[in-house]
Image: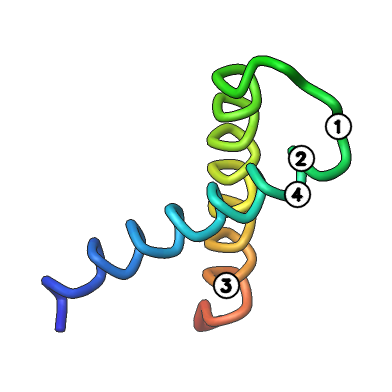
Amino acid sequence: MTKLYPVIDSLIRIILTIAFFYIFKHFFNVENDLILAFISVFCGFLTFRGLMFGFNKITAKK
């Protein structure tokens, strides 16, 4: 099961990146998709880290 965690992390990051890309493409009129992809990867990274931080805070034993 431990070997499966990196795969799940990667899939979640890919899904977040694709979702942010198409959300930004829908709302903003950007001609350069490379800039949009960079922003999407950055926002996906921040969202994933925030979700992992929140999940670890909730599940931490006190």
Give the residue pinned by disc 1: 28
SS state under label 1: loop
Q: Give the mark, 2 or 3, whose residue is nearer the N terminus.
A: 2
Give the residue pinned by disc 4: 23
The image quarter containing residue 21 is top right
- Residue 19: where, in percent of width, then height? 62, 55
Mark 3 crowd level (few <14, some 14–19, many ≥20, 10 Å Cα): few
Q: Is residue 46 above or below residue 60?
A: above
Q: Do the residues labelled 2 and 1 touch (CB within 8 Å)?
A: yes
Q: Which of 12 and 32 is in front in this view?
A: 32
Which quarter of the rendered picture does the N terminus lie within?
bottom left
SS state under label 2: helix
50 left or right of 18 in image:
right
Mark 4 crowd level (few <14, some 14–19, many ≥20, 10 Å Cα): few
Give the residue pinned by disc 3: 55
Q: Give the mark, 1 or 4, whose residue is nearer the N terminus.
A: 4
56 left or right of 40 in image:
left
Q: Is residue 36 above or below residue 20?
A: above
Residue under the image location 86 percent in, 32 percent down: 28
SS state under label 3: helix
